[in-house]
Structure formats: C-alpha cells, structure tokens
C-alpha cells in the first residue's frame, strides 16, 4: 500500500450501505460508519450518546499482543481518550470484507493502526503476562497517559489482518466489540517519518464532512428479518 488516506478507511462500509435495502441493516451500517469516523476524528465522547451505545458496553480485545476485557463505560472511554490524546485513533484499511445481520456487523480487514512507540513497549510487556495482569498493566498505562507522564516516542503503523464483530441491541445501539488478530505473528511494524504522522486534529478536519447524524430511530430499528448482506 503506497498511498494512505484516512478519508478512504470506511469506503467499503459506504459501498455496502449504498447496496443495502433492508432498513435495519442500513441503520446498523450507518451507525458502524459513524462510530468509526468519530473514533478516528478523536470525538470519542459522541460515541457514548444514548442512541449509539448501551450504558455499559463490553469490549473483548485480542490484538497488538494483548488480550483484555473492558467492561463498562469508564474503561472503554479511557481507552478511546488515551488513543485520542496520543494520536492513535488513525486507521487505514487496504481491503475489507463486511457482513451485516439483524444483530451485528462483522469485518475482516487488512488494516493499519497508527500506534506510538510507548504503546508498542507496553503491549510487548503485557503479552508475557496472564490476562489479569495484562488488564492491570492497561489500567496503569491509561492512567499514566491521562496524567501526561512518560514519552510516547516515535510513531509506527501496525499492519495485520483483523477480525471484528460489533453487536447491537434492538434499538440499534452498540453492545460491544470483539476484535482480534487471527495470526499475531504475521504483524508488520512500519516506522513513520514525522511528516507521515496524522494527528487527531488533522483527522478530525478531514473526516468532518463525512460524519453524518444517525437516521431517526423508527420502528424499523426493532424489526428483525432473516436476510443477510455482505460485500467483498
């Protein structure tokens, strides 16, 4: 991948939206698109709007060498805040397969995550620890970043294949995310030149025209069907 443009990260999602006629599926895909764009723009507070996410989401993450369960808004919001404050909200997608059903959106992607040298060091250490210790280290790391301590170091792109399942309730609100790498050993780490680093402020400016409000919550949000759509 020679050219990376954050405005193209969700292009496969938008392609599927344009091809989807089931109203509930379209709503979930639009919520998925909006969430990813808000996240990359550093507007994480908006992710927790009552029409977008349940009050106490649960995330299961097995990526970057760490396996951890984040339960509740405080933990999940701390992660997003940490990423926004360290310019780690930037993602690029080279190719992606997306599927949508009544209750979830799933994705298999070859993607890049802009990540700091500090995060790489922390996840390397955490990969050798049991799960409960990994979570403790994550709490310490998030607190350290919140207080502005430590040096983030240079920035990198972490490249690998990622699997994701995002679950939604009857109102189309995100219940939680499951994200994992099927082959962690296949990851590539590419050091970025300072000129290649995209800041959260830059991402927000680029993505702002693409961030649309959700459609009105109508009865169709609660509707269920047996249909299934996907894009390759």
Image (cartoon, rainbow, N blue to C red):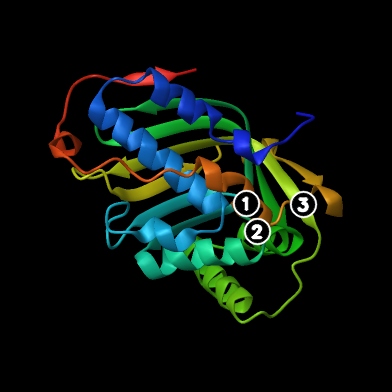
* Left or right for 89, reference 105: right
The picture places residue 148, in percent across and down from the top left corner, at: 66, 79
Residue at disc 2, secondary structure: helix
Please name the residue shown 25% across and 23% down the image.
22
Are there few (<14), some (14-19), or many (20+) residues within 10 Å of tag 2?
A: few
Residue assigned mark 3? 197
Please name the residue shown 29% across and 62% down the image.
56
Asked whether disc 2 touches disc 1, contact meaning CB atoms under 8 Å apart, the reply is yes
Quarter of the image where one finds residue 105: top left
Q: Earlier along the polypeptide chain: callout 1 or callout 3?
A: 3
* Left or right for 84, reference 164: right
Alpha-carbon distance for marks 1 and 3? 15 Å
Please name the residue shown 61% across and 33% down the image.
8
Quarter of the image where one finds residue 147: bottom right
Front position in the image: 125 or 197: 197
Task: For residue 3, say whether it is visible.
Answer: yes
Alpha-carbon distance for marks 2 and 3? 11 Å
Asked whether disc 1 touches disc 3, contact meaning CB atoms under 8 Å apart, the reply is no
Residue at disc 3, secondary structure: loop
Residue assigned mark 2? 201
The picture places residue 125, in percent across and down from the top left corner, at: 67, 63
């Amino acid at each position: 991948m020679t050219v990376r443009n954050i405005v193209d990260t969700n292009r496969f999602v938008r392609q599927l939206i344009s091809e989807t006629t089931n109203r509930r599926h379209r709503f979930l895909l639009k919520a998925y698109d909006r969430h990813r764009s808000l996240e990359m723009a550093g507007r994480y507070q908006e992710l927790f709007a009552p029409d977008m996410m349940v009050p106490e989401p649960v995330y299961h993450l097995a990526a970057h060498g760490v396996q951890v369960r984040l339960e509740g808004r405080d933990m999940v919001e701390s992660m997003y805040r940490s990423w926004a404050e360290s310019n780690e909200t930037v993602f690029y997608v080279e190719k992606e397969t997306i599927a949508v059903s009544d209750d979830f959106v799933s994705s298999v992607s070859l993607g890049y995550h802009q990540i700091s040298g500090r995060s790489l060091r922390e996840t390397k250490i955490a990969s050798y620890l049991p799960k409960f210790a990994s979570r403790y280290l994550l709490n310490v790391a998030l607190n350290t970043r919140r207080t502005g301590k430590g040096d983030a170091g240079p920035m990198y792109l972490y490249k690998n294949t990622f699997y994701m399942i995002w679950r939604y309730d009857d109102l189309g609100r995100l219940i939680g995310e499951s994200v994992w790498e099927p082959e962690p050993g296949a990851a590539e780490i590419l050091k970025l030149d300072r000129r290649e680093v995209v800041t959260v402020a830059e991402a927000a400016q680029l993505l702002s025209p693409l961030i649309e409000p959700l459609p009105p919550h109508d009865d169709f949000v609660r509707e269920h069907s047996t249909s299934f759509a996907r894009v390759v």
